Image: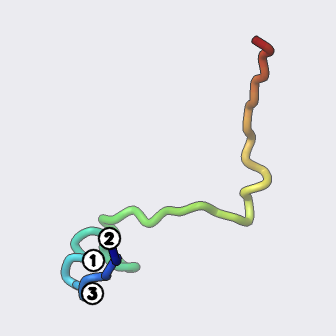
Amino acid sequence: GVHVLGPKDEKTEIKLFGTANDKETQHTGINFDKYENIPVETMFQLC
């Protein structure tokens, strides 16, 4: 099969994601500048 993108629907995009100035929509993402400083706990156990 072939994946074909549908036409851009600006009204739906705004409904789902808001706008950059929208105070009611939370705009978050990964801050890659701090990515290396994120604490990660790992555990290893031999079976």
Crowding at mark 3 (Cα within 10 Å: few <14, some 14-19, many 20+): few
Residue positioned 26% across, 77% down in the render: 14
Residue 43 lies in quadrant: top right
Up-down relation of residue 18 to residue 36 (above or below): below
Residue 25 percent coordinates (x, y): 33, 65
Q: Is residue 29 left or right of residue 9?
A: right
Residue 35 percent coordinates (x, y): 72, 57
Disc ID at residue 13 = 1
Q: CA distance from mark 1 to mark 3?
A: 8 Å
Name the image quarter holding the C terminus. Answer: top right
Q: CA distance from mark 2 to mark 1?
A: 6 Å
| Mark nearer the N terminus (3 vs 2) | 3
Is the residue under label 3 in contact with that under label 1 (CB below 8 Å)?
A: yes
Residue type (three-letter) at the residue carrying disc 3: Lys
Residue 11 lies in quadrant: bottom left
Front in this rendered view, residue 3 or 39: 3
| Mark nearer the N terminus (1 vs 3) | 3
Is the residue under label 1 in contact with that under label 2 (CB below 8 Å)?
A: yes
Disc 3 secondary structure class: loop
Q: Is residue 37 left or right of residue 5?
A: right
Which of labels 1 and 3 is toward the front?
Answer: 3
Name the image quarter holding the N terminus. Answer: bottom left
Residue lying farthest front?
Answer: 1
Q: Is residue 18 left or right of residue 32?
A: left
Up-down relation of residue 13 to residue 33 (above or below): below
Q: CA distance from mark 3 to mark 2?
A: 14 Å
Residue 28 percent coordinates (x, y): 49, 62
Which of labels 3 and 2 is toward the front?
Answer: 3
The residue carrying mark 3 is: 8
Front in this rendered view, residue 12 or 27: 12
Q: Is residue 5 left or right of residue 27?
A: left
